[in-house]
Amino acid sequence: MGLNDQWMQRDLAVLWHPCTQMKDHERLPLIPIKRGEGVWLEDFDGKRYLDAVSSWWVNVFGHANPRISGPIKAQLDQLEHVMLAGFTHSPVIELSERLVQLTPAGLNKVFYADNGSSGIEVALKMSHHYWINSGQPGKKRFVTLSNSYHGETVAAMSVGDVALFTDTYKALLLDTIKVPSPDCYLRPEGMGWEEHSRNMFAAMEQTLAEHAHEVAAVIVEPLIQGAGGMRMYHPVYLQLLREACDRYGVHLIHDEIAVGFGRTGTMFACEQAGITPDFLVLSKALTGGYLPMAAVLTTDNVYAAFYDDYATLRAFLHSHTYTGNPLACAAALATLDIFQQDKVIEANKPLAARMASATAHLVDHPHVAEVRQTGMALAIEMVQDKPSKTAYPWQQRRGLQVYQHALSRGALLRPLGNVVYFLPPYVITPEQIDFLAEVASEGIDLATRSSLSVAVASDLYPNHRDPG
Ligand SMILES: *Cc1c(COP(=O)(O)O)cnc(C)c1O
């Protein structure tokens, strides 16, 4: 038995993995990773995998990068943690200063949480609480887009829309208002992204006109709906939304947990619309993917609504134990240093162009309905029938075949249902991009070749992060 198998057996005896039907591991091997270096992950039997999805979208500058791990080690010898109520420390102050300076004008206060979902909870609670403090307690509902994803905790799940996943927990969810997404995959043939996104705004406008009195905020994933299958839309939608939120007196929450830090081609997606949201939620690449942390940025106006004598009970009495952890702050500061020193946003442009050229041939594939891209995110939509864009039934788990093929070739490509995507670390080389495109093409050929090439397991259901 190889070392991989030994670790796998010990694992399966005691662990319950995230986003996994554990029974799958009766036939799908689990891959124990021993070490990482740059874009590579290496297992216990010495096999390497190119991390094409940045380990769930967090890793932007590669694994075990000494420019990030070094500062974390230095911080570790100085101060590993101190509670952030009543106390503070230099890494959290410096990080907050830099985030305020980097993000669009007007976002001047930073509140921390320890993962993306918790960051969303902070923004939702803060928004409603703002309206209470402003004498409008009836503003308590949230407007969301169809096909959106904002995390796993109950309120974050409530503002998301991954049907088979959220349906199970329906009884627990908040009462939200769902508006059709501007998702450009669904645009009429021949129409451009901008026109479609603009047209789709009509439903949002109507919803706000009708419900603004009871709505605290609209929450969106700007430009890319990630877990919903890397569906994309035009920045004009965000401009129209900002303008409408102002007109109707509703907050705008940008969940840039996945798209922040260069993924869309600009440091933050909201820059492409030239707007400032009322709440900007950041996580994932914030620490380069080294430690869990989320930051919620907001305006002086929101902050002021909470600032009063203690006895008025207007304070935001929300806390996560590890808020502002110094090690995570050190990782984030090191990550921001790399963005600055290496002019990463500029340097990514040729890489994004290479992602496009390396996959351009897939547009002609008989089972590819679309190859779409926004910056450093590229997605390939596999379909059963190309002219009608009929999706493969989820039970066939075509994406899983791509996943397995890629592993055999030394790449970690983890499709979202029928959507194969690249969301690579920015330290990937043009040649490595070509390699990924080759592996993806082969995988798509294999997965779409036969009419029923995949074992159907009726006890498995699709999930937003599941390659099935
Ligand atoms: C990953 C993600 C979240 C949740 O973050 P976690 O750290 O997994 O809780 C929320 N919103 C978006 C857009 C995400 O991609």
Image: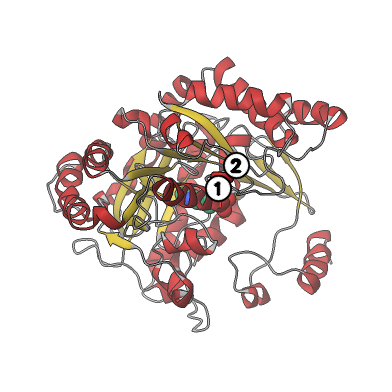
The location of residue 243, given as percent across then percent down, is 23, 37
Amino acid type at circle 2 is Tyr
Q: What is the tally of numbered marks visible in this picture?
A: 2
Residue 52 visible, this orientation: no
Callout 1 secondary element:
loop
Amino acid type at circle 1 is Leu
Q: Residues within 10 Å of mark 1 (few under 14, many from 20)?
A: few
Q: Residues within 10 Å of mark 2 (few under 14, many from 20)?
A: few
The location of residue 100, given as percent across then percent down, is 51, 25
The mark found on residue 313 in the picture is 1
Callout 2 secondary element:
helix
Q: Is residue 368 above or below residue 84?
A: below
Q: Name the residue under label 2.
A: 310
**Front in this rendered view, residue 245 or 264:** 245
In the image, farthest residue toward the right: 77
The location of residue 238, given as percent across then percent down, is 28, 39
The location of residue 324, given as percent across then percent down, is 68, 37
